[in-house]
Image: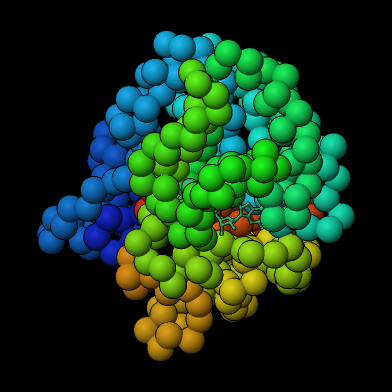
Amino acid sequence: MGEVRRVRRCYGCGEVLQSDNPDLPGYADPWEMEHHEIVLCSHCFAEQRKKKKAANEPILDTDFREILKQAKTNKSLIIYVVDLFTFETSFNSEVAEEIKNNPLIVVANKADLLPPKTNLDNIHDYVAKRVTDAHLNPLKIILTSVAQNYNIDEVIKTIFTYSEGKDIYFIGAYSSGKSALINSLLKTYKNPTQKYISTSIYPNTTLQVIEIPIDEQHSMYDTPGLSLSNSYVGKMATEREVIHDLIPKTLVRGRNYFLKSKDALLFGGLAFIEVVSGARAAYSIYMAPDIGIHKTSMSNANEVFERIIRKKITRPISTLISTSRDLDVYEIKVDYEDKCDIAISGLGWISFVGNHQIIRVYVLNGISIYHGTAKV
Ligand SMILES: Nc1nc2c(ncn2[C@@H]2O[C@H](COP(=O)(O)OP(=O)(O)OP(=O)(O)O)[C@@H](O)[C@H]2O)c(=O)[nH]1
Ligand SMILES: [Mg+2]
């Protein structure tokens, strides 16, 4: 496993901070670096501009705790729906903590979006590991695609087995497919009301808890999606055009680029990576096809990034990002020779063969990134 290190940048000009050479850009006093999180480079020090740092952990709002209160007291059956395409974003350890004493079924949805050669057994094992790491002990983990009706009968069978005498709560990140899953269950149950729940690609479709009675005493509950403050989808929830481009509708194929040292790859007007050093390698980008990818050099990355945003020659472009200074930068040291992935919350992931590269990842302030060998 390589090392992920957050590179500290000047909160004034965005320059990568260093305390080795006062004559080079980004110099900051070593004492300041050690004792303060927010540091300005010597050049910006005079201006003393302040910028607040956003947390990288998603925030579980109190409303959701309120919603889960009754479910916890009654030991209701929880169906935790996660989105396989953005699993890292979709699975939330804070929520896991809330539901650890409830009977639980994990539905890992949108399997249809994964690349064609994906080994679903490996994905199942990966989900199981993450769930176990979060101290959950689900009755079952089921990989599904509501869109392609894959394993929905398995979900129904499992719910039947474990739901006797219980309410059923569908919870999970927004746009993970909770309402779509309930609708497909309702169709199978020959729903006499012929009423269905609204679904859409946009976050926050379900705004309040919807109760669907299943017998005289018990109900199914569809709940609003959890907010994902550490994901592009969460941050840009109100920008409909961005969300439209971010969320893939059909299978995502890798887009391949050869990158050598000092190359950079830009992802729409949202993020970019730089190969600081390391051998030339093939990088496969798994992101929604509407996200424009531009290759350039590290020395031109900032300028090209700003130009394609200013001239609107890429997609998506968000009101939150106009310059690379709006981005945080992380540095990843890949200290092994094996397949590896870098996932960016709500955007997708980058798959490549690790070969002692140093890679910088620029993402909007507060977005989480993950590095490992887990996917596919
Ligand atoms: N490709 C794919 N899309 C899916 C799948 N399931 C749901 N969707 C789509 O994902 C989007 C979100 O689905 P919803 O059911 O509205 O998601 P939700 O979890 O209820 O979202 P909120 O109510 O906002 O929390 C919709 O456009 C669905 O059509 C799936 O298995 N595969
Ligand atoms: Mg919904």
* Residue 308 seen in this snapshot: yes
Q: Position of residue 296 (x, y in %)?
A: 59, 78
Q: Position of residue 161 (x, y in %)?
A: 72, 19
Which residue sits at x=31%, y=56%?
10
Q: Is residue 166 left or right of residue 283?
A: left
* Residue 360 seen in this snapshot: no
| Extreme residue in the front direction | 192
Q: Position of residue 276 (x, y in %)?
A: 60, 61
User: Total marks drawn?
Assistant: 0
Q: Is residue 193 left or right of residue 186?
A: left
Which one is nearer the viewer's eye here, 49 or 111?
Answer: 111
Which residue sits at x=27%, y=55%?
11
Which residue sits at x=43%, y=85%?
312
Q: Position of residue 374 (x, y in %)?
A: 73, 40
Which residue sits at x=50%, y=21%?
216
Colour theme: rainbow
The quarter of the displayed image where residue 64 is located: top left
For the N terminus, give its image quadrant: top right
Q: Is residue 53 left or right of residue 358?
A: left
Which one is nearer the viewer's eye here, 353 or 369?
Answer: 369
